[in-house]
Each structure stands twice: as structure tokens, then as C-alpha cells.
Image: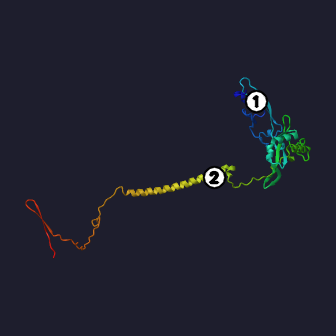
């Protein structure tokens, strides 16, 4: 069984067929083919000749496993075609929602192959476009669907067909090929085919971008605007904080200066003797007559001390009469 290193497959492009080593690159792990440069339809560009070629690019791709006992490999031919507007066809389905066509995309592709006898690649499925401009925008009908597809020859090198090629003839009015496509699509898919046309020339439409309106999710389309607004708010708050700190510091320094001036008077106190006419306190006197309180007369008590040290007490009573 292919387990561990035996199951690892690496991909590469054969050097002998690497006609464009600076254009294509194949990932050695997943085998996906990628472009190394952009194709521009500009005469001054370096790859103008490659951009305007009609024949596909032919590459030989090799896949090799990582077996240590005996490596196995397989080679295949890879054809890369450049799709331009001249290679596109548009199938217009009447009164058929786009969601229904997306769900049955593979079935529509096979029906188109049966009707055209070509290899069909469905490039895009969208709501029906109408060749009129309303409010600076292309008119769209959501109830109908446009299916953009590409035709390629069924044999190598699978060259793409052009929509102005008379041998294809599916974009000419009342063409028998259009009738065939209508019959097969309508019978197999149960829908009404309005026509098969060329894509509209977008360069003829001067479409003005819609005006931006205020919305709660405006930052989704312009995230940098949200960052700029946030930075402005932060700067404003920082300025307010600096002003508050400066004002508080000025008040604090003013208090410190007043406190130091107050404390400086107690550093070397100078005591002076006050004048004699200034007294520490003032006294006042009040002369008034107060009648004596009535005291009962208990007579006189005489105390005598004799030579022997005894004490004699004699009470003399006075009689008031």
C-alpha cells in the first residue's frame, strides 16, 4: 500500500516542454498550475505576443511517487488557453432564477456539450443583463439568467472557438444551431431559452460608481477610514488630557509657592518685649454693698487652756429681750 513516503506524490513540468518557464509554475506538492506574470493586451508590454496568441500553451506535466523500492511516474499533456471576450458565449434563460441554474450547473454544461459537440466550460452564471443604461448602471433582470460559457474543440490541442467564427454560427439570428440548443436545453432542463448571444462590450458603457451613503457598516468597504477616525479621536483625547494635566500642575505649583512663603515666617522667629502700657490681660473691679445674711445667735464659746494642759470650754448665752 502507498503509505508514508510511498504515498507522497510530487509534480513537475518536463524541461523539454517548458516553453514558458517564466510564465507558468506548478506546485510540487498539490500539482496546481499557477501564473508567474500577468497577461496584458497592451502592445508595449513584454508578453504582448503571448497575450494575443490563439493557440493554447502546451506543457508536459509529470507526477512521481516517493517509493524507495521503485519510483513510479506518469506524464500527461496540459493545455492552457487564454479566454478573451471573443471566446465567450452567453446563453439567456427566460424566467429562470439564477439560484436554480447554479444548483444544476454541471447538468447545463453537459446539455450544452450535447447540443454543440464541443467541450463546454461554464465561466459565469449571473442575472440577466440588458443592453440599456439606467441611472448610470446596466439594467438587470433578477428573474432571468445569463450563462456565460466557452467552447473548445474536442480534440487536442483543444483550441477555443470564437463567437465571430462563421463555422460556429450559434450567435447568428435564426441559426439552426441556436434552434438545436433551444430544443436540447428545453427538453433536458425544462426551461425556456431566449437566445444565445455575444457578451456586451463593457467598454461602451460609461458606468458611474454609486455614491457612498452613510451606513452603520461603512468601515467594511473603507477600513482605513475607520482607522483614521479612531486616530483622530485618540489625538483629541490626548490633547484634552494634556490641557487638564497642565492646568492641574499650575494650580499645584501656585499652592506650593504660597505654602513655602507661609512656612518661611517660622524659620527664624523674632520675639520682642511688648510695651509696658500693654498688659497681657485687663482687670476690672466693682464696689457694691451686700447686706449680711441673718445668722442665728448661739452665744459665745470660750476655750481656756490650764497649766495642766486641759482644755476648758464655757458657753455664754446671750438673751435677747
* Circles 1, 2 touching at the beta carbon (< 8 Å): no
Q: Residue at x 82, y 53 (%)?
A: 132
> Total label count?
2
Dot 2 crowding, Cα within 10 Å, few <14, some 14–19, many 20+ = few
Up the image or down, 249 lies above or below 296; here it is above
Q: Which residue has dot 1 on it?
A: 63
Query: Is residue 185 at all visible to an observer of this figure?
Result: yes
Name the mark nearer the viewer: 1 or 2: 1
The image quarter in which residue 287 lies: bottom left
- In the picture as drawn, the residue positioned furthest to the top comes out as 69
**Looking at the image, is 292 positioned above or below residue 244?**
below
Residue closer to the observer: 318 or 60: 318
Q: Which mark is residue 83?
A: none
Q: Compare residues 140 and 242 and report the one nearer the observer.
A: 140
Q: CA distance from mark 1 to mark 2?
A: 53 Å
- Dot 2 corresponds to which residue? 229
Q: Which residue is rendered at x = 39% and y = 56% of the image?
A: 263
Quarter of the image with the C terminus in it: bottom left
How far across and down, in percent of the image, does residue 120 sit? Answer: 84, 40
Amino acid at each position: 500500500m502507498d503509505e508514508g513516503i510511498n504515498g507522497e506524490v510530487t509534480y513537475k513540468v518536463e524541461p523539454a516542454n517548458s516553453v514558458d518557464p517564466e510564465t507558468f509554475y506548478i506546485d510540487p506538492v498539490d500539482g496546481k498550475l499557477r501564473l508567474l506574470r500577468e497577461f496584458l493586451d497592451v502592445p508595449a508590454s513584454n508578453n504582448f505576443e503571448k497575450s494575443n496568441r490563439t493557440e493554447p500553451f502546451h506543457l508536459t506535466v509529470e507526477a512521481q511517487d516517493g517509493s524507495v523500492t521503485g519510483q513510479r511516474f506518469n506524464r500527461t499533456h496540459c493545455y492552457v488557453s487564454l479566454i478573451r471576450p471573443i471566446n465567450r458565449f452567453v446563453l439567456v434563460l427566460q424566467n429562470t432564477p439564477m439560484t436554480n441554474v447554479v444548483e444544476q450547473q454541471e447538468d447545463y454544461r453537459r446539455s450544452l456539450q450535447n447540443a454543440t459537440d464541443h467541450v463546454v466550460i461554464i465561466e459565469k452564471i449571473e442575472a440577466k443583463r440588458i443592453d440599456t443604461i439606467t441611472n448610470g448602471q446596466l439594467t438587470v433582470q433578477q428573474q432571468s439568467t445569463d450563462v456565460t460559457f466557452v467552447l473548445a474543440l474536442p480534440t487536442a490541442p483543444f483550441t477555443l472557438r470564437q463567437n465571430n467564427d462563421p463555422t460556429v454560427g450559434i450567435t447568428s439570428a435564426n441559426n439552426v444551431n441556436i434552434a438545436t440548443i433551444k430544443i436540447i436545453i428545453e427538453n433536458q432542463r425544462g426551461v425556456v431559452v431566449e437566445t444565445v448571444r455575444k457578451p456586451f462590450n463593457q467598454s461602451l458603457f460609461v458606468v458611474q460608481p454609486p455614491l457612498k451613503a452613510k451606513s452603520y457598516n461603512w468601515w467594511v468597504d473603507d477600513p482605513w477610514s475607520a482607522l483614521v477616525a479612531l486616530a483622530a479621536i485618540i489625538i483629541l483625547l490626548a490633547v484634552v488630557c494634556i490641557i487638564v494635566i497642565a492646568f492641574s500642575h499650575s494650580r499645584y505649583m501656585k499652592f506650593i509657592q504660597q505654602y513655602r512663603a507661609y512656612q518661611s515666617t517660622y524659620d527664624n522667629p523674632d520675639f520682642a518685649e511688648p510695651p509696658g502700657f500693654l498688659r497681657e490681660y485687663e482687670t476690672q473691679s466693682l464696689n457694691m454693698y451686700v447686706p449680711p445674711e441673718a445668722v442665728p445667735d448661739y452665744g459665745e464659746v470660750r476655750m481656756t487652756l490650764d497649766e495642766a494642759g486641759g482644755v476648758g470650754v464655757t458657753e455664754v448665752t446671750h438673751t435677747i429681750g
